[in-house]
Amino acid sequence: HDDGIHHIVSQSLSTLNQLTPSKMKFHLAVAFLSATAVAAFSPAGQTVSFGVDSKLHSTPAFSGPSLEYTGGTDPNNKNIKKGNLSERLQAADTERRKAEEEAERRERAAEIAREERAAKIAYMNNMPEDTPAGTVDEFMFKEGVQDQLDKLDRELVGLTAVKSRVKEIAALLVLDKMRRKLGFETGVPSLHMSFTGAPGTGKTTVAVRMGQILAKMGYARRGHVVLATRDDLVGQYVGHTAPKTKEMIKKAMGGLLLVDEAYYLYNAANDRDYGQESIEILLNVMENNKDDLVVAVAGYKDRMDQFFSYIPGFASRIGNHIDFPNYLPDELVAIAGVMAGQLEYNIDPSAFPVFKNYIEKRMELPYFSNARTVRNAMDRARMNAAIRLFEKYAIRGENMGNISPEQLLSIDAEDFQILVDDIVNADSDRRIFA
């Protein structure tokens, strides 16, 4: 092509020397168009010469932007698998292998179940008719269940209905274990619980004892109790809730997870609240991991009832609803005696009526918290006893400053009378702190 273009240009230049200026322009235009047409169909990247000093760089034919393939807008392009043939074959082989392994696992599980059932039938057929199942008392004491129930009786004053319900659950576990001993079919009962009641009524104490009973009977690996609130389960931003909830569940695995004031997990006024994600995770764990984790929710009864109405799936997964009533004044006085004994103090007999008077007045004020209020009152009475002894023997120097062991162990009526006087003499807006 270069020779053809050079010939056209040479002839045009020789002719131009013989033409007038007007004809010269016409011949130059014809020569330029001829050269351009030849260059358009020349191989890409080839240089075309027009003489000594002129060059025309050709453009590859049919290579404009409008002719380049950009993938188009066909929606079916999304369905085209990426990668070469070997990669696609390898992926298909991996999927096939996983499906085969899953089928083998299911078949093996079914085979093991058939073998266990056959062994159980053979065991029951060969069992002598007079084989003893054992007594309930034997299982209660051997497994340590009775010891936990005795501790519950000692630590919790009153609450007869609560203790009765705990004993019923323990009885179910004991009889279930006796059935297993004889080879009867057994299933893990629903052990998830709901504790409703005011603060200080013993919900946490019962949860601890239930965790230990479950561990003794083999329904929990560790039997520990993990206490959680909304702050422990719900995150502050997107993607934060799931890790927090799963971390608390991981800590509680093998024991009991007690969610205090569970109704704060759900915010009915905000559909985008992150607590809903935590609830969904808990529901899934309660259903799929009930063999290794017991979930207990606690709070005020009216609020818990409302919470269950919003989340019916929660109520349906809980098989044990236990209501904790408020303590009576006499029961709270007895609780004070138990607390004093645990702290190695002796309450003088004359001090009990004074303390009961304080409790009755305090129950009429807001924010009364049953056993927690008693514990706070006991701490203040101990402090009053310490101040009384310090002033008597250290400041006034009575008995040359010598204090007897009995005096160090004693809480007197005047130590509780200070609490009564604080309520009687305090301003109306400050009585709740007395």
Image (cartoon, rainbow, N blue to C red):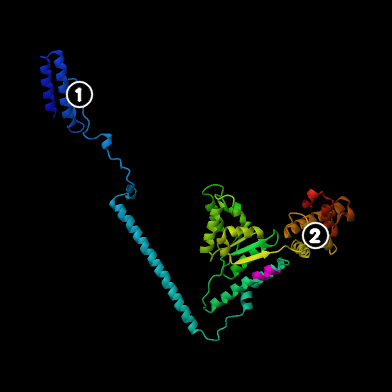
User: With respect to residue 209, does 241 lie above or below?
Assistant: above
Q: Quadrant of residue 140?
A: bottom right
Q: Identify the residue position indicated by label 2 in the image.
A: 360
Which structural element holds mark 2?
helix
Task: Pick whichever, 323 or 307, lies toward us.
Answer: 307
Instruction: Say whether residue 162 is magenta.
Output: yes
Does residue 151 appear in the picture of this structure?
Answer: no
The mark lying in front, picked from 2 and 1, is 2
Q: Identify the residue at horizontal 51%, vertical 84% (top origin).
A: 127
**Amino acid type of the residue that numbered disc 2 sits on in the rendered structure:** Glu
Does residue 181 appear in the picture of this structure?
Answer: yes
Q: Identify the residue position indicated by label 1 in the image.
A: 55
Residue 283 screen position, x and y as percent: 54, 60
Residue 59 screen position, x and y as percent: 22, 30
| Left or right: 98, with 262 as reference point | left
Residue 307 screen position, x and y as percent: 61, 58
Looking at the rendering, the stretch of residues picked out in magenta corresponds to 160-166
Instruction: Say whether residue 118 is magenta.
Output: no
The mark found on residue 86 in the picture is: none
Of the image marks 2 and 1, the number of the one nearer the N terminus: 1
